Image (cartoon, rainbow, N blue to C red):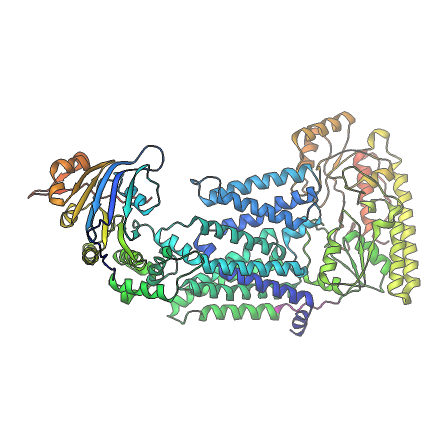
Amino acid sequence: MSHLASQFLHPFVQRASLELLLLCVTAAALGPWILMRGLGFFAHAIGTAAFPGLIAADALGIAPQLGATLGAMGVAAGSGVVSPTTRTGTRTALWLTGAMAVGALLASNISRPGAGVDSALFGSLLTSTTADLLTAAGAACLAVGAVRLGGPRWLSEGMLGRSWPFWNSALLGVVAIAVIAQLAAVGALLASTLLVLPAAAARPWASTIQRWAFVTGVFAVFMSLLGLTASLSFDTPPGATIALTAGLCVVGSLCARSVSRSISRAPIGGGGAAAMALSALIVTTVGCAQTTTPPVVATTPIIGSITQQVAGNDITVKTLIPAGADPHSYEPRPSDIDALSTAELLVRSGPGMDDWAKRAQDRAGGKATTLDLAAGLPIARNAAQFKSTDPHWFHDPRNIAAAAVTIGNALSEIDPTHALAYRARAGRLARTAADLDRRARRCVSKLKSGERNLVTDHDAFGYLADRLGLRIIGTLIPSQSTAAAPSPRALDGLARKIRSLGVKAIFPERAVDPRLAVNLGRQTGASSKEQLDADTLGAAGTRNGTWQGMWVNNVETLVSALSGGRVTCAITQNGGGSY
Amino acid sequence: MVPISAQSAQPAVLVEELVAGYGGTPALTGLDFVAAPGERVALLGPNGGGKTTLIRTLQGDLTPISGTFTLRGIVGHVPQKSSGRNDWPVTALDVAICGTLDALPWWRVPGKAQRRAAREALEAVGLGERSSTPYGELSGGQQRRTQVAAALAGGASVLLLDEPFAGLDAVAADRLEKLLATLADSGTTLLIATHDLDQARSWEKVLCLNGEQLAFGPPEAVLTRQTLEATFGSDLLEIPGGGFMAPPHHHHDH
């Protein structure tokens, strides 16, 4: 309990709470009207419409928040016009579908969406900036003002059949702005959560609109603070936790209402208050996760693996992206922000891989030194499809050796008493990398020239192919976004290449949906059973849970599949796990 | 409560050569009639005959295709039965207050004065006791009278009522009928769309519509067999013992 209370002393948690309270004001004012006018789907659509805006912003090089706003406003404006005979829901669906289609096309054909896209999709409540707070405050003022003036007009439209075209558009506009203000906190996918769910939970307890707004505000504050507390207790991403909490609260409210109705004419709100108190008690007592905050934070599992090996038992390294997770869908958890705000050293992979790291660190208010490993590497590979340098440098062991030394020096600076140990472990890791490099090259040399053609999911293995003398003749996905898909012509061309060169295997990645590779394999006769690790590692303790394990596994898999099983080589006797 | 104008000789409603419709072909032609303050005018006609078109045009919802009309004073509108959301948490008083919005500039919201006017209007329609009852819990007749109260709260001296008796039982219809008579006595002009020939017979004027104006005047002059057959076609039923009945009412909401 005291640990939980102490978390609320963190400036980032206080900022998050303040942002939530501002959003609750908006929710209290607008929520009842969104439900009365049937604008729940509209609100959700506005949030979702931020996605194509984000992709377009990324492609055009403008700020993601601006892109999201423009996308959302476009759909809002489209829902308000188009044709006077179509109802709002249909219009909204029409515009949303169009916008999402454009977004998917952009994602597939223009560029790989960067980090801004992901943080805007999933929100970053714990890293709220002053701008986010001002946006939320502005939206709250606007919502309260609009409801004050527009409320009676919307009421007369519903009750007396009057028509107020200006005030109707104003309602759509204000709802759109309210959703956009929520984007930064809970993300595009959950942006309508606080606008819809508290009002839905409050509805059975309210007999007038004013009372409904008040109870909505109470529910909104309760849901969001309970969700934030749960997120801190269980160390889960706050956006999704708040959405889930809110959903449970709605169910609880409706059940409590029907129970209190059937038992007696109990004073209204008694049941609801009891349900709230009970769930608050459960959340605050159940989860009191004890966390220590290590002074060194790494962004991805691969970086975490090599950093931890250099740090040894002297420092525990905190890795932000969990093993096996797609690095492109990252929402900071409370413990991440906690770690970032107190860390002394942030080790990151580099541009194109973990662009979100710098922003997350700035917002967490940390003063850690950032070590950008990509900046000082011996091998840098330029590729047209990446905006600058290919970010997958860790698929060349020579880079790992160099990175180990860099990390060793950085750790020595923040903890000079163990400098010797860090430098020694860095040297050992560098030698291991060189050794694994040699063994891999010896193994691949057994492949014939015709067996050296490689087809992978996305452009992750350029370094590996360069180092081992393999040729990448094609990739399945034209970019790294999960929304991207190849065009039919590109797939057909690839299939023809695979057949004419007699490629024996296609390699899906572990973190990506393998169906495309499986289909192409079936079509061309190439094997698609073997998976490679590109950007992430397996769980700790598994064969590919370390960088060494990943490298060994990738090379062994490649050689065996490309030669159709003719060549097999065990690079290490024990799978590399002991390094 | 509605003040009678000093110049009661002037007509409250003056319609001249009006052609109305929804753009495209006119739905209603040849409208030419006058109503004095305090008169009840029955709008008679089959479904689709143009009653709602006329009301929406006079209300200002539709622009006339040609011709002119003049309404003296504030116009109040009581829409068809289906409007009014029973699921919204609003009281009868909230609904009556809504009627005062038309007279307010956009930056103002109803205040104390409007609240008082709404209360008085609810008293006037006999719902003074019901002002804090949720609208959805009112009976059909009470809801209709609440809508009338909203129009009165807005200071209406001309009321346009679109089939106010549809769906009411005999008791509720009787109460509404009495309310309308009281309003007419106090100088309010009422244009009432209806299917009930007996009601129309007891009011001051009748306007027969079926795509065009077929007749206008006092009921005894207008409600003849020929006019009614022209209005309702062969659907007209003759009631044994004298009198006619319009075809059964079909409610339609749009």
**Outermost bottom residue:** A2
For residue A428, what is the image quadrant? bottom right
Q: Position of residue A106 (x, y in %)?
A: 65, 39
Rendered view: B241 above or below A500: below
Residue located at (72% from left, 64% from top): A338
Place of residue B122 in the rendered image (x, y in percent of width and height, measured from the top left): 28, 63
Query: Would residue A250 be visible to someone looking at this image?
Result: no
At horizontal 81% and vertical 54% (from top left) the residue drawn is A305
**Relative to residue B144, is residue A339 drawn left or right?**
right
Residue lying at 37% horizontally and 67% vertically, measured from the top left: B112
In the rendered view, does A382 fall on the left or right side of A364?
Answer: right
Residue numbers of the magenta segment? A286-292
Return the x and y of residue A19 as percentages of the image width and height.
Answer: 61, 62
Q: Quadrant of the C terminus of chain B?
A: top left
Q: Is residue A172 above or below residue B230?
A: below
Q: Main secondary structure of the magenta part?
A: loop
Q: Position of residue A260 (x, y in %)?
A: 41, 68
In the image, residue A288 lies in the stretch drawn in magenta: yes
Q: Quadrant of residue A271?
A: bottom left
Residue nearest the observer in this picture, A377 or A78 = A78
